[in-house]
Amino acid sequence: MKMLVSIPLLAAMLLLTGCFSDAPPSKQTASEIPDVQIAEVQAWQGAVSQKLPGVVRPGKRAVLGTRFAGTLLSVEVEPGDRVTTGDLLAKVDAREVNAAIAATRTKISATQAGVEQARLESQRLERLYAEDLIARVQMERAQVKYQELQAQLQAAESELEAQQANLSYTRLTAPFNGRVTETPVDTGSFVGPGQPLVIMESRDQLRVDVPVSSQVASRLTPGEQLFVVVGPQGKSLPASLISVVPALGRRPPASA
């Protein structure tokens, strides 16, 4: 960005002021004429910086909850606790999920037996049809029944996978290294899908959100190296621009 200096306009105003004086011109001796120095005005070519206020946020933040309704059995952490990836944070009652898993496994076992029986029957009728001992329609009915039971078995196995995934959500674990900031629900509470149970953050890296005008944003490039001034001592830290995101809101503050 270039800085414009209005020195020529100021000189013209001073000259006009002298031109309209009512006093008669006076003679000046050579010794009274002041020396005048002339300097060439050039556009500023140096770097231009702006200071803008921002909000410091954690680099990572996770709001953890369950996918189904149940009773919160325990919360294993307190706000302020440091945790590492995989640490147990909370447990939700899994009795209903375990019951559903047991029922589905029983269904799978019964369906597997039916599939095997249908397979053997289909093969038997295929041999009889090849010997011209039965009608074709009998063989085809056996084949259709076998295919239907196979489809039922696949559906039951998919249902079991989904239930086992739900079971994993009865044990909330830390997705990254960080610190617990909130545990908004007490043990024994009935919780539902989407309800926050544990909130944690990681401050190994920090993010700074800075509102800027569209004129400033147009000159910024992701990956650009910037500096962030923090603390009462005004410590300057290097930072990297992640992204420029359009946003609606109040006008950004003027640069200082």
Image: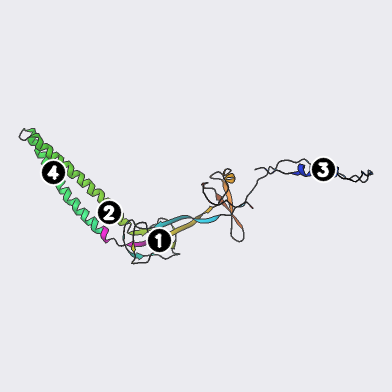
Mark nearer the viewer, 4 or 1:
1
Vertical comparison of 105 with 34: above or below:
below
**Residue 198's disc number:** 1
First along the sequence among labels 3 and 2: 3
Q: CA distance from mark 1 to mark 3?
A: 74 Å
228 lies left or right of 89: right
Q: CA distance from mark 4 to mark 2?
A: 27 Å
Q: How is the image coloured?
A: rainbow
Mark nearer the viewer, 3 or 2:
3
Badge 1 amino acid:
Val
Give percent across and percent down for residue 17. Answer: 83, 45
In-front residue for pair 6/37 = 6
First along the sequence among labels 1 and 3: 3
63 lies left or right of 208: left
Residue at x 28% of width, y 54% of height: 164
Mark 4 and mark 3 in contact? Answer it, CB < 8 Å.
Answer: no
Mark nearer the viewer, 4 or 3:
3
Name the residue carrying label 4: 118
**Residue 163's disc number:** 2
Name the residue carrying label 3: 16
Badge 4 amino acid:
Ala
Q: In which quadrant is the N terminus drawn?
A: top right
First along the sequence among labels 4 and 1: 4
Q: Is residue 149 visible?
A: yes
Residue at x 28% of width, y 51% of height: 162
Q: Secondary structure at mark 4?
A: helix
Magenta highlight range? 88-97
First along the sequence among labels 1 and 2: 2
